[in-house]
Amino acid sequence: MNLKQPVRVRITFQKRGSLRFLGHIDLQTLFERALRRSALPLRYSQGFRPKARLNLASALPLGFEGRAEVLDIWLNEPLDPDMIMQKLSQALPQELPLTEVKIVDNALPSLQASLKSAVYTVTLPEIICKDSRAAIDSALRQDSIVVERREKQIDMHPLIEEFEWLNACCFRLRLRSVPQETGRPDELLYYCGIDPAQTAIVREELIFQEE
């Protein structure tokens, strides 16, 4: 049994390029393997098959890029954040660059428990910009935007906290992201008759309660 006080490390990273098609479970496995290769003094779970302790903030849907994804790991001893970044970066693919590493208080709630909302940008193909913009603006003027998720109907209108057009073909929206009330930009697109596979969706920011 490890009696040392664990050191909680918060890592911000990007998920880019072809790795946008890597699923959440596979991403977690990738990080577990990279952490083992990094030779960092990892904190492991108890039990018959111990694993490195890590906690991803929120699953990023397939096909989305992420500019500010967040991961917590735990170490058995304190290290300089720059050293942690260097060691882990060397073990990760180039399409998963680290942008920040910091030590945080163990008393903080889990990432999932403290997540409030997420900010996305969606870029539409130029050929469908005009019609798509009209469909989206029409949907936002309605009192409800009812979508189907796992055989249930959900009104995502109240989940849209902010919306703005950045240019003729690109918009930014902030969606609520708490348990049982998580908005997804691809569902808005489907509702408006737009194929999300034809667009570029990027999660730009995760917003937490302590922020």
Image (cartoon, rainbow, N blue to C red):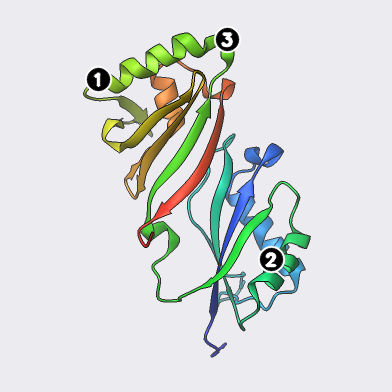
Q: Give the percent coordinates (x, y) of residue 108.
A: 40, 71
Q: Residue furthest front?
A: 167
Give the secondary structure at mark 3: helix
How far apart, in angstroms, are the residues tagged by discs 2 and 3? 42 Å
Kind of residue at disc 1: Gln
Q: Give the percent coordinates (x, y) of residue 83.
A: 71, 72
State the image quarter where residue 46 is shown. Answer: bottom right
Q: Earlier in the sequence, mark 2 or mark 3?
A: 2
How far apart, in angstroms, are the residues tagged by discs 2 and 1? 46 Å
The crowd level at tag 1 (other Cα within 10 Å; few <14, some 14-19, many 20+) is few
How far apart, in angstroms, are the residues tagged by discs 3 and 1? 25 Å
Q: Is residue 175 left or right of residue 54?
A: left
Q: Residue furthest bottom?
A: 3
Q: Residue at x 55, y 79 (%)?
A: 7
Which residue is more in the foreground, 193 or 129?
129
Kind of residue at disc 2: Met
Q: Which residue is mark 2?
A: 85
The disc at residue 142 is: 1
Q: Is residue 203 above or below residue 25?
A: above
The crowd level at tag 2 (other Cα within 10 Å; few <14, some 14-19, many 20+) is some
Q: Give the percent coordinates (x, y) of residue 49.
A: 62, 71
Q: Is residue 203 above or below residue 208?
A: above
Q: Residue at x 24, y 20 (%)?
A: 142
Q: Is residue 198 left or right of residue 190?
A: right
Give the secondary structure at mark 1: loop
Q: Earlier in the sequence, mark 2 or mark 1?
A: 2
Q: Residue at x 55, y 89 (%)?
A: 4
Q: Earlier in the sequence, mark 3 or mark 1?
A: 3
The disc at residue 127 is: 3
Which residue is more in the foreground, 90 or 102?
102
